Amino acid sequence: MKAAEVLRLYEKGERDFKGVSLRGQNFKGKDLSGADFSGADIRSTNFTNANLTGAKFVKAQAGLQQIWGDWLFVISLFLLVILGGISALIGYLVSLIFDSGYLGYQVIGWISLAVVVVVLFSLCRKGIDAFTFVKTLTGILAFAGALAFAGAGAGAIAGTVAENLVVAVALAGAVSIAGALAIAVAVTLAIALAIAIAGVVAGAVKNFAGIVAIAIAGAAMAAGLFAGIITQALAGTVAIAVAVTIMLVSAYIGCRALKGDKRDTWICSIATAFSAIGGTSFRGATLTDADFSQSYLKSTDFRRAVLLRTRWSDVKGLDRVRPGETYLNEPKIRELVLTGNGQGQSYDHLLNLAGINLQGANLINSDFKGSILKDGNLQGANLATASFIGATLNSVNLQDTDLSNAKLVQTQLDEADLTGSTLTGAYIEDWNITTKTKLNGIRCDYVFMRLPPEGSSDPNPHRKPDDWNKTFGYGEFTDFITPMVETLDLYHNQTVDPRAIAIAFSDLRQQNPNADLEIISMEKRGQNLDKFNLRVRTSHQADRSQLHHQYFDRYEHLLTLPPQALVALLMEKEEKSQMLAGMVGTAINRPGTNTHTHTNINNTYQTQGDTIVSEQGSNAPKYDLSGAQFAGGFAETVQGNQVGGTINNQTSEGVSLTEAAAEIQDLLKQLEASNPTAPAETMSEKMTLATQAIAQIESNPTLKQRAVDALTAGGMAAFEKAIDHPVAAFVVGAIEEWKKS
């Protein structure tokens, strides 16, 4: 079928082109997405830069047409005959060692032998790349030059100047001839090998050993001819031996290259490039979600092709394609996509595996540390105990995969689909899931929040659920781990002031009513838990970058204000903001100490009592934070436990404390009596009363000093209790600030 007919039918909506013959047709740059070419003959077809998204090439026949294979056969024979002839010539030059009639010929013979030995030894032992080739020949020529000059010096001593000049010229000529022949042999050897292998790669030559035998025979005949005409019998034998040796080494290297030996990758690269000339071309084509299962792809060009989620199951000849810089260039990955079995293999050094299709693969205990598998397909794969430490799995299809005991430490899973996967026993320390990660129907009994260090005997590192005898019920893990919403993270990397946080956040919410700001968690961060993060839900339309900047601009300004100003500003805010200051104060209290934080909106201070969040004085309602979790994600949780009890701190200065407290209590009663709305019941009324009392005390230096002394002697808890008034906590907090100043 002609390309024009296929394109015409495609435009009419036809997508079924199964079994058609498209040999030699041109679809360069065309859109054939979704077309089905299963079983089609696409040898020498040009799909360069075509859009073949979702196309099917199941059991398709790609590669070279017969005419191209025949040409490769002829070229391979021709180059091998040339190699045989050059081998014979080198054999003849080596045989000059036995020419006793002229010193220059003997030098040529020895240098030729040295070149042959060094080049063949390098090729057999280590392989040889371009750099090594140049370096080796440079050394040979330098040695030959030194030998020539040494010979010239010897001639000067032994004879006349004229004789010396003749010998020097002869030796220099020998060096030049030998060097040129060395270069010619090495280059021709490489090219001939590559082209000959290309014949095998392309399938034109069925028996590589046979073609080598022909070349060896030709070389032997040529060597014998040279030796019989020009040299003696011994020299002829040497010439034949050298020629045959060169051809045998060439055959050995060729077979080694065909087996994929890393020492000879350059030979296979040249061979596959040559064999792909005239073959099927997918160069630059978009092959996203294309299916080449069970197809024949030898001598096909995939350079610069887009191979996202392309299927290669049971493809023949995949090691003989021209891969370019795609992941098909790596033998271990070719084997993996062909068989789907990577059990126990390490791929941690193969970083860029983006778009790889491993649907249903067996990858038990394999290692993808640091690899990028973005946009890949691992649906139904067995990934039990696999390591994805630091790997990027963004947008990867992980539906119904078995990730039991897998290491997902610092693994990126944005937009990944984990629907129906199994995560029991997985290590998920610092993994990155987002609201776009699909977590529906996950099967999970328990997970570990930390990866234990090597040699650790801890069998349950931060296990969730914490009770070793309990497991997650159906759907509970998803509820436990799913990020609630897109969040604004207000991270404070220095010691925080709860009042400044409450004021700054209140202002941010008032100035951005459409952002729908709502606090969902508070987290203590850092190695010493001395950092603080306020996680806030926002609307999808909110500019989180702008909100972040706006908040910290206000917060940092508030930190420059004196404590009294912060107290006054906080008193002006709504009750929720004042409660937030208390909750932040509780959240930043370090767990594990002998003292607990008694938090009010004025200050955070230490008592020998219990963790309480207080809205105002001792008669005000307490907010029980027992079991409250302020930290989200995977940060350590901060919990408060309201135990109750009475604070009875007494000091030797009890009279002074009692007198000062009584005087302040009288002042509060006088202010209440003069207030037409007394008694103060609402939060704003209590704040107003406290502000007035603080102002009165501050304007009376004697009373202020007595209050500071009493606080210093008796402590905040005792002083607050002695005042015995609903706003006592606010007043005592202000006195504490005076004491600090």
Image: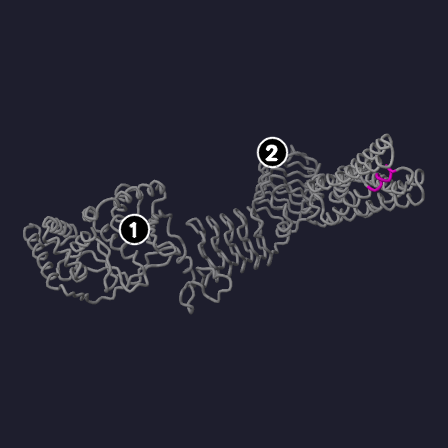
Q: Residue at x 63, y 46 (%)?
A: 328
The residues tagged by marks 1 and 2 sit, at their Cα atoms, a distance apart of: 60 Å
Colour pattern:
one colour
Q: Which residues are magenta?
A: 103-110
**Residue tagged by mark 1?**
496
* Magenta-span inclusion, residue 107: yes
* Magenta-span inclusion, residue 172: no
**What SS does tag 2 mark?**
loop
The kind of residue on which mark 2 rests is Gly
**Residue tagged by mark 2?**
29
The kind of residue on which mark 1 rests is Val
- Whether residue 75 can be seen here: no
Is 135 situated left or right of 535 in this image? right
Q: Residues within 10 Å of mark 2 (few under 14, many from 20)?
A: some
The answer to which of 299 and 588 lies nearer the viewer is 588
**What SS does tag 1 mark?**
loop
Query: Looking at this rendering, what residue extends furthest in the bottom direction?
Result: 469
Q: Is residue 226 positioned above or below 626 on the image?
A: above
Where residue 334 sits: x, y (%)?
64, 49
Counting labels gives 2
Which one is in front in this view, the residue at disc 1 or the one at disc 2?
Answer: 1
